């Protein structure tokens, strides 16, 4: 059975996978995904047996990384906790009681697996699966009205745990990859996108947001890794800023993607996205 993302994450790359995988290097050493989110490309690579030399996954959202740690280290306990929550699905008061755990001073003292079960429960039952924090860093997405939300797909959770067994997980800013990546490692950057218009911005995955300064810093990190001989791939919106930051890279292409076009998840539109690679596609068959 193939492992799939166990979280619904904004910007999930599920439907962009064919465009990404057709531009991947054929051979590489370790795989790094520093904007992990739902980890769609990681699971794809694991299912295709391409991670024999290991993987390093990171994100600056500690609650997200804790979910991966719980799935890797304590999957049966996590499944048990989520199954215990099933009878409370649709109970709005219970949702807000669990959501408010992070308002209590002892929140960080709770076992990691309990905090992870809370995050997964909220991810599956809050409005639109939105991960949103207020300016105090407290989770504040509202209750979502679902007929029958699936909070745990037991078989997939076990498979995801299997996929994560030998993976290094880190909480931290994307620049941490500079200390870890070596020549011939493959790095996929999927940052919060440059907004296509002033109102389209969705960069509130974490409290800090991701503005032009971070986009510029990311392009500097991309170029440093490329000079080091790493194989770097990045996706972003097809905007003037993003295009300019990566001009001159061997692959700099626009592809068509179907995306939500407003807050109504049912309405989708086709938009252009940017893919950049630091290696030429006909020369990427290096044998490191
Ligand atoms: C577009 S999502 C990644 C989606 C992912 N590729 C998937 O398939 O689900 C961007 C991720 O970047 C993380 N992030 C935002 N700012 C960051 C930063 N400065 N350093 C590292 N991660 C960051 C967010 O927490 C979020 O999970």
Image: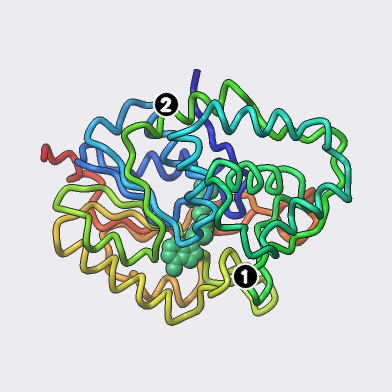
Scheme of image coloration:
rainbow
Q: Which residue is mark 1?
A: 137
Disc 2 or disc 1, which is closer to the eye?
1
Disc 1 within 8 angstroms of ligand 1 (CB):
no
In the image, taking residue 213 as reference, residue 265 lies left or right, namely right
Residue 129 seen in render:
yes
Q: Nearer the viewer, residue 217 or 63?
A: 63
Q: Residue at x 58, y 33 (%)?
A: 78
In the image, taking residue 191 as reference, residue 51 lies left or right, namely left
Residue 28 image point, x, y percent: 21, 41
Q: Which residue is mark 2?
A: 162
In the image, taking residue 120 as reference, residue 277 lies left or right, namely left
Q: Residue at x 39, y 39 (%)?
A: 21
Residue 256 image point, x, y percent: 55, 52
Residue 206 image point, x, y percent: 56, 67
Residue 273 seen in render:
no
- Considering only order in the chain, which callout, 1 or 2, is on the residue closer to the N terminus? 1
Q: Residue at x 17, y 39 (%)?
A: 285
Q: Residues within 10 Å of mark 1 (few under 14, many from 20)?
A: few
Q: Is residue 176 above or below residue 129?
A: below
| Residue, far left | 288
Where the C terminus falls, by quadrant? top left
Q: Nearer the viewer, residue 7 or 284?
A: 7
Q: Nearer the viewer, residue 97 or 123?
A: 97
Q: Nearer the viewer, residue 158 or 29?
A: 158
Q: CA distance from mark 2 to mark 1?
A: 32 Å
Q: Residue at x 26, y 37 (%)?
A: 54
Identify the secondary structure beneath mark 1: loop
Identify the secondary structure beneath mark 2: helix
Q: Is residue 213 above or below residue 50?
A: below
Residue 114 image point, x, y percent: 60, 43
């Amino acid at each position: 059975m193939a492992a799939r993302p166990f979280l619904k994450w904004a910007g999930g790359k599920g439907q962009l996978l064919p465009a990404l995988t057709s531009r991947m290097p054929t051979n590489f050493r370790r795989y790094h995904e520093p904007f992990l989110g739902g980890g769609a490309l990681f699971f794809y690579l694991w299912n295709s047996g391409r991670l024999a030399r290991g993987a390093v996954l990171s994100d600056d959202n500690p609650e997200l990384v804790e979910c991966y740690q719980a799935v890797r280290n304590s999957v049966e306990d996590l499944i048990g906790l989520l199954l215990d929550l099933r009878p409370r699905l649709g109970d709005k008061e219970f949702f807000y009681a669990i959501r408010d755990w992070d308002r209590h001073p002892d929140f960080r003292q709770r076992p990691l697996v309990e905090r992870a079960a809370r995050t997964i429960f909220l991810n599956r039952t809050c409005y639109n699966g939105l991960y949103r924090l207020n300016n105090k860093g407290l989770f504040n997405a509202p209750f979502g009205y679902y007929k029958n939300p699936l909070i745990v797909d037991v078989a997939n959770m076990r498979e995801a745990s299997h996929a994560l067994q030998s993976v290094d997980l880190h909480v931290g800013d994307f620049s941490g990859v500079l200390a870890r990546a070596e020549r011939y490692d493959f790095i996929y950057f999927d940052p919060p996108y440059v907004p296509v218009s002033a109102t389209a911005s969705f960069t509130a995955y974490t409290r800090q947001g991701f503005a032009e300064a971070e986009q510029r810093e990311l392009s500097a990190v991309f170029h440093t890794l490329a000079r080091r001989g790493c194989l770097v791939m990045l996706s972003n919106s097809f905007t003037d800023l993003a295009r300019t930051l990566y001009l001159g890279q061997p692959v700099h292409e626009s592809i068509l993607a179907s995306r939500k076009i407003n807050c109504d998840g049912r309405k989708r539109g086709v938009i252009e996205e940017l893919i950049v690679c630091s290696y030429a596609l006909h020369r990427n068959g290096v044998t490191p």
